[in-house]
Image (cartoon, helix red, strand yellow):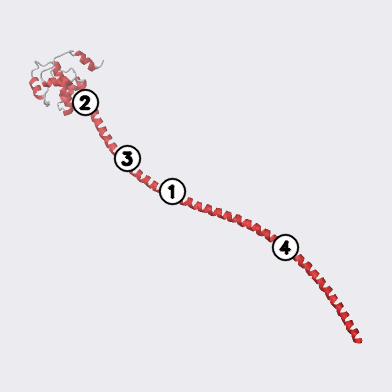
Amino acid sequence: MSSKAEIYMNQPPERKKSKDPYIAKLEEKLPLVELDPDITFEGLEFAPYKDYLRRKERNFDGVSTYELQEMVLALAKDCLVMKLKNEIYENYLKRQNPFFEIGIEHDKKYAEIQAQQKSLEEEIDNLEEGLRVFQNKLNRKVDKETELAREREDHLKKINKNMDKMKKKVLDIKTNRELAERELKSFEKQRKKLMEEECKFEETSAQNQEKSSTNHDWNLKKARSRFHISKNIVDNFGTF
């Protein structure tokens, strides 16, 4: 069982609430702690408890130990906030009241948490600022890359268009080459045919020339023969 539970079990289970507004206020929010009722309150300057404590510190008649415990605990809690200068009271609470040390540690942790939270908020602000800067850079880079991509796409379209033209030219050249090859074959056939005809013509010409030469000689012999006959006739006629 915890010390706090033991303290609660050592206290009366039921009690009447004080009519004093300060005590009643303490009763609502403070736990039960065993403290020395003879503790002095000199040097404490906490309103609204100050006047009440000064009235009661010399005479504890009519004030229960339980009420004093709650008042002291309330003061102890206020001491954490207001920085009590009464070292005797503070040291006493450290020795007797475990909740005092817990409260100090709680406030320290709370202060550390607040400092960490502030540091985190500053870090978050820095990160958000860095994120905005990075996002702006990223947007500019994306815009630049988008522009470059658009330029590359336009350039690629031009290249594709030129390639289509070149393909068409190559196809035309191929077609023209096929036509030229067919014409060349046709020309070769015609040339071969002409050469054959030329050879035939040369053979025919030679034969004709040879035949013509033979006929000429024959005609010449025939003419000479006729000349001699005519001459003989004339000669013979002259004798008559």
Labels 1, 2: front one: 1
What amino acid is found at the position of numbered circle 4 in the picture? Glu
Q: Are marks 2 and 3 in contact (CB under 8 Å)?
A: no
- In this rendering, the answer to whether 120 lies above or below 43 is below
Residue placed farthest to the bottom in the image? Answer: 239
Q: Which residue is mark 1?
A: 153
- In this rendering, the answer to whether 212 lies above or below 146 is below
Q: Residues within 10 Å of mark 1 (few under 14, many from 20)?
A: few
Locate residue 238, reporting x and y percent: 90, 86
Q: Are marks 3 and 1 in contact (CB under 8 Å)?
A: no
Q: Which quadrant holds residue 134?
A: top left
Labels 2, 3: front one: 3
Locate residue 171, reporting x and y percent: 55, 53
| Lower position in the chain sequence, tag 1 or tag 4 | 1
Q: Which residue is mark 4?
A: 197
Q: Is 152 left or right of 45, judged from the image as shown?
A: right
Locate residue 141, reporting x and y percent: 37, 45
How far separated are the C-alphas under marks 3 and 4?
A: 95 Å
What amino acid is found at the position of numbered circle 3 in the picture? Leu
Labels 3, 4: front one: 4
How far separated are the C-alphas under marks 3 and 1?
A: 31 Å
Q: Which residue is mark 2?
A: 104
Q: Residues within 10 Å of mark 2 (few under 14, many from 20)?
A: some
Q: Which residue is mark 3?
A: 131
| Lower position in the chain sequence, tag 3 or tag 1 | 3
Q: Which quadrant holds residue 47?
A: top left
Q: Is 81 left or right of 220, judged from the image as shown?
A: left
- In this rendering, the answer to whether 212 lies above or below 142 is below
Q: Residues within 10 Å of mark 3 (few under 14, many from 20)?
A: some
In what quadrant of the picture does the C terminus appear? Answer: bottom right
What amino acid is found at the position of numbered circle 2 in the picture? Ile
Residue at 51% of width from left, 53% of height from top?
Answer: 165
